[in-house]
Amino acid sequence: MNTSLATTDRGRAFEELFCYLLDQVPGLRTRRNALNHYNSEEIDIAVANTRMSNGLACFPHLFLVECKNWSNPVDSSTIAEFIDKLENRRIELGVLVVANGVTGDPETLKSAYHKAAMAQSRGHRLIVLSLDDLLKASTTREFTELLVDRLLGVVVSGTFQLL
């Protein structure tokens, strides 16, 4: 089997899972795999939020999601690319969903954590969720609470929290 094709298929399956979870939250509408005008950047999932009280009322009206179903942790350059997508579109919030963590050290704000902290100082927040996080959320309410808790963690600490 072509390794690149297998990686793409795993990535698409990860996107489908997260998109399914988002579609269960009241007030959210999603669009998947959209390319920019120049076909040079792909957005995994764009989310419109009507801010329903039983949904994600404290989230912004628009946010982007990037899904990385990689066997290795996501590195700081990949995080920087996602933050660039947010900045280029003037989007406040990004959600990064990772299968196997991120590089760096949250205590010393090394690598990926530093990139996220710097982005917040420029008005862009980054939430990171792991596959383990998603598997622990067995209801829409638990999933919504997870997202809100992660947003609060970013606001309080200045960078994402990956528990």
Image (cartoon, rainbow, N blue to C red):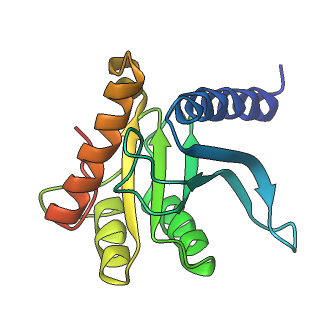
- Which residue sits furthest front? 53
Q: Residue 8 or 28: which is nearer the viewer?
A: 28
**Left or right: 126 with respect to 160?**
right
Q: Position of residue 35 (x, y in %)?
A: 81, 61
> Is residue 70 or residue 143 the one in the foreground?
143
Image position of 138 with respect to 112: above or below? above
- Residue visible at 53% across and 44% down in the picture: 27
Instruction: Please identify the quadrant where the C terminus is shown.
Output: top left
Residue that sits furthest to the top in the current view: 138
On the question of residue 105 being in view, the answer is no
Q: Position of residue 67 (x, y in %)?
A: 57, 43
Which of 133/55 is in front? 55
Quadrant for residue 75, please give it. bottom left
Vertical arrangement, residue 76 with respect to residue 139, above or below:
below
Viewer-proximal residue among 84 and 32: 32
Residue at image point 59% right, 33% down:
23
Compared to residue 135, the image places residue 40 above or below, namely below
**Residue 18 visible from this viewpoint:** yes
Residue 117, image quadrant: bottom left
- The residue lying at 39 percent from left, 60 percent from top is 126
Residue 31: image x %, image y %?
A: 72, 48
Side (left or right) of 106 relative to 8: left
Residue lying at the far right of the rendered structure: 38
21 sits to left or right of 129: right
User: Dividing the image into 4 quarters, which one contains the N terminus?
Assistant: top right
